[in-house]
Amino acid sequence: MVDLTGLHKHFILEHLTEGEVAVDFTMGNGGDTLFLSKTVGESGKVYAFDIQEEALTSTRAHLEANGAPQNYELICASHHRVKEFVKEPIKAGMFNLGYLPRSGRKAVTTMRETTMAAVEAAIDLLLPDGVLIVAIYPGHEEGRLEGEMLAEYFSTLSKYRICASEFKILNSPTSPYFFLIEKSPRCKEWDDKNA
């Protein structure tokens, strides 16, 4: 069977290397934060966002237990506020939309309004040859609607600046799927030419 989490990491590693800046836009229990932290190493930087203090506590414990470099900043704020905290361009970002795993609080979930603002900000912060992974969970109503909204938005982006791809299991419509957003290595050159 397809390992979607493995694919996320595969695509991130094609773009992100040691010393670069990455953002975990939905910290959860820290799995993506740990992966990004170890990928960018001591000389890199990772910012991680969640609105729940429980997520920060769980993530901090996970990072410490697994030997993450001290290169991360855990931020208790909505991901749509990313530009208030991240002032430099980023090479990679990861979104796992939905609710905090194992929290038992499925009513606390990402919402379309803030998700769209966060994704737009992420693309704006993204360096040429940068990458975003946006994981969608259509098994609940808001997740389904988030996916539909983002598919529509991504389809409008200039193919000269952004390559937007979708990866899903066709015969399992409620299974998670993800969007891969890659910014062209030549997009600054294209922007300058068409300014």
Image (tube, rainbow, N blue to C red):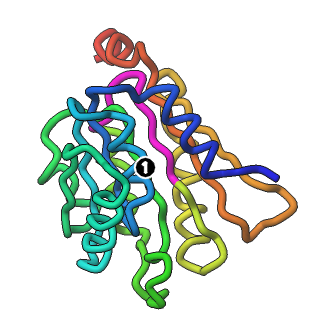
Q: Left or right of 156: which side holds 7?
A: right
Which quadrant: the C terminus? top left
- Image-quadrant location for residue 80: bottom left
Q: Is residue 96 above or below residue 43?
A: below
Residue 169: horizontal and vertical position, in percent? Answer: 79, 55
The magenta segment: 125-134
Q: Which residue is mark 1?
A: 94
Question: Image point 83% across, 56% down: which residue?
Answer: 170
Q: Which amino acid lies under the numbered mark 1 shown in the image of this protein?
A: Met
Question: Image point 36% across, 40% down: which residue?
Answer: 38
The magenta stretch spans residue 27: no
Question: Image point 44% across, 85% down: which residue?
Answer: 103
Residue 92: horizontal and vertical position, in percent? Answer: 38, 37
- Image-quadrant location for residue 51: bottom left
Mark 1 crowdedness (10 Å alpha carbons): few <14, some 14-19, many ≥20: many
Question: Image point 46% across, 21% down: which residue?
Answer: 184
Q: Secondary structure at mark 1?
A: strand
- Image-quadrant location for residue 159: top right
Residue 190: horizontal and vertical position, in percent? Answer: 38, 13
Residue 55: horizontal and vertical position, in percent? Answer: 32, 73
